[in-house]
Amino acid sequence: MNTIARTLAGATLVLSAALPAAAKDFRLGLITPPPHIWTQAAEAFGADLALASDGAHSVAVFPARQLGNEAEMLQQLQTGALDMAFMTVAEVSNRAPDFGAFYAPYLAQDIAHAGRILRSDTATDLLAQLPATVGVVGTGYGMAGLRQIVSRGEVSSAADLAGVKLRITPFEPLLDFYNAIGAAPTPMPLPSVYDALANGQVDAIDMDAELIWALKYYEHADTIVQSDHMMFPMVGLVSARVWAGLSEEDRTMIGDLMAQHVDGTIDSYIAKEGPWLEQIEATGRTYIKVDDTFFSDAVASWNETWSAKTDVLDDMRQVAADTAE
Ligand code: BEZ
């Protein structure tokens, strides 16, 4: 039995005894827009589940925050009002701080390394705490690209970000990072970002290559900083209440298929991140590539802060060292 299967089996034990199979129309929510890799993976998961269950099950996918923001969707998963979600680990880390360890700045050397970390047993083992701590079952990890900075003004050093209103995904590890830099981090969910950057409500954003390119954030920027400073994991979730009502056979089918489709996003980003960044660079904006030295002691400061917030940081670093090339 692989570690994901072990995790799911463990979740099953703490929830309830298996029930007979029953046809079900599941609802799956996510915040990404329809063409986004996560949304495409959710649609493909639904199609495969319908096939594997001979049409007994279907999945209606609700993209682009149709069911609410991630905090609201997580609440719906807890009550069983929502069946499934593909969600940022960022949101989950707001309830389960151990997941903050994934955001150690420069934990991953590059996007492929981020994928190897997410496919490790240490990462999978973290999912085991989700039923008890958050009320959801985590079936496996996906990801988006590494994080970059898009700025309306010129940026040549981290000092240029001091006091700058910089949009972040609303979660603590990123907040701590930009506070350590001396920026003015502004938590803002994804759907609000384009307008906020366009109308100057924020002067910079923390974002990944796919969305900088696909949603044309670069159009409102003078500078792109390719910093690759953090990975951005996603997790496939099923409401623990809903999981408890599934047969053993359905748990296996749903758990395996969902894990397969979220994992597939890792391969997509590994293949596409480079070409997206090249296209962004070719737009002619000022484009600088930086490493951890750009952020001077902000990285060390983050590490110190988060050593006190989670015990798993050392384990995650060990995985990163073991899987580095
Ligand atoms: C973001 O908040 O930047 C984000 C959320 C989901 C997918 C990709 C990016």
Image (cartoon, rainbow, N blue to C red):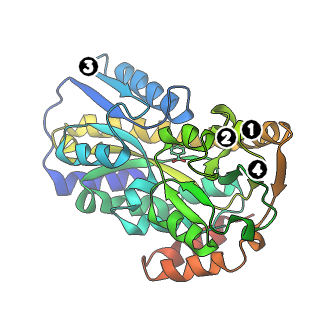
Taking 24 as reference, is 143 above or below it?
A: below
Residue 228 at what x, y percent from top left? 70, 57
Q: Is residue 22 left or right of residue 268?
A: left
Q: Amino acid at mark 2?
A: Ile
Residue 1 visible from this viewpoint? no
Q: CA distance from mark 3 to mark 1?
A: 39 Å
Taking 36 as reference, is 70 above or below it?
A: below
Please name whichever residue, 190 or 312, is drawn nearer the observer in this view of the structure: 190
Mark 1 within 8 Å of ligand 1, using the beta carbon: no
Q: Is residue 249 left or right of residue 111?
A: left
Q: CA distance from mark 1 to mark 4?
A: 13 Å
Q: Amino acid at mark 1?
A: Trp
Residue 106 at what x, y percent from top left? 66, 67
Instruction: Answer whether labels 1 and 4 touch (C-beta < 8 Å).
Output: no
Instruction: Answer whether labels 3 and 1 touch (C-beta < 8 Å).
Output: no
Q: CA distance from mark 3 to mark 4?
A: 48 Å
Q: Amino acid at mark 3?
A: Ala
The residue sitting at 24% across, 43% down in the picture is 76
